Amino acid sequence: MRIPLYIEFEDKKVLVIGGGGVGTVRAKKFLEAGAKVRVLSLEFSEELRKLAKEGKVELIEGDAFDEELLENLISDSDLVVVAIPSLKVNDIVWKIAKKHKTLVNLANDAERTEVVVPFEDEFEGIRFAVTTEGKSGIVARKVKEAFRKLLEEDEEIIFFLKAMEHLKRFMKSHNVPVQLRMKLYFVISADKEFRRLVKEGKVDEAQNLAEKLVEEYVSGKRKIDESLVKIRF
């Protein structure tokens, strides 16, 4: 069973098999994440050749069915992406990747792939990713667009994020113990006056109130309503 994760790919080694359209898109995606990308193919898109000239990607001209070549490349990769139409190479890649504990993304087989590359977007510091796990990329794109529209039309969510980010930074800078911080996230976010200020877009006032509430809870002046706490560290 797959689970959604955000993984740091800075300096991770990614091998993309296939230099066409799909391979180019995947290569660029991991380049943007800071990965070290190599592309194995007999032919390469003009965009990949340009990236190679700029020193951003390494192009390896070779046959994807050359098991010795694949062994050498996959053994030195954190992730291998198969981005060619033929499904026949998948079994070879799987066998080698499993031996070297290299993760596998099959752009040509959504059901069998180990790693899913979803459609993603970001708005005002909120990142989100959508996948139907191979059922329909068109629908996944539509859902992604719907999510973005929802965020664009709901200013309160962005105000809420800014206020809560400030609360987190404030508590960390004042060395509030993590167990207490976890509780206060829930308690303060449920405070009626805090939420009123957020709803009205008075972010500075909401942040000031949050600081005051933290001080009162830490000092013991206020008691924590444990029923509001959904997760404990």
Image (cartoon, rainbow, N blue to C red):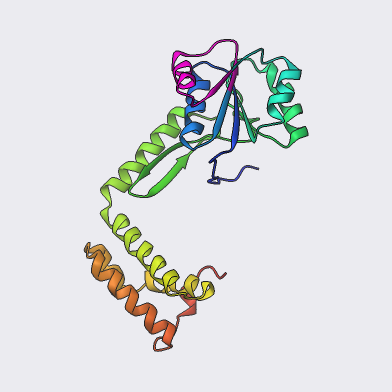
Residue 117: horizontal and vertical position, in percent? 53, 34
The stretch of residues the image draws in magenta is 39-59
What residue appears at the point 72 percent right and 24 percent down from the top-left corner? 72
Q: Is residue 153 left or right of residue 90?
A: left
Query: Is 221 colored magenta in this rendering?
Result: no
In the rendered view, tell whether residue 20 sits above or below residue 190: above
Residue 224: horizontal and vertical position, in percent? 45, 81
What residue appears at the point 40 percent right and 86 percent down from the top-left corner? 222
Res 185 visible: no
Quarter of the rendering containing residue 78:
top right
Q: Nearer the viewer, residue 211 or 61?
A: 61
Q: Is residue 80 left or right of residue 225?
A: right
Q: How many marks?
A: 0
Residue 40: horizontal and vertical position, in percent? 61, 19
Q: Nearer the viewer, residue 101 or 35?
A: 35
Residue 168: horizontal and vertical position, in percent? 41, 66
What residue appears at the point 48 percent right and 27 percent down from the top-left corner? 56
In the rendered view, tell whether residue 102 sits above or below residue 55: below
Q: Is residue 10 left or right of residue 208?
A: right
Q: Nearer the viewer, residue 140 or 85?
A: 85
Q: Is residue 12 left or right of residue 65?
A: left
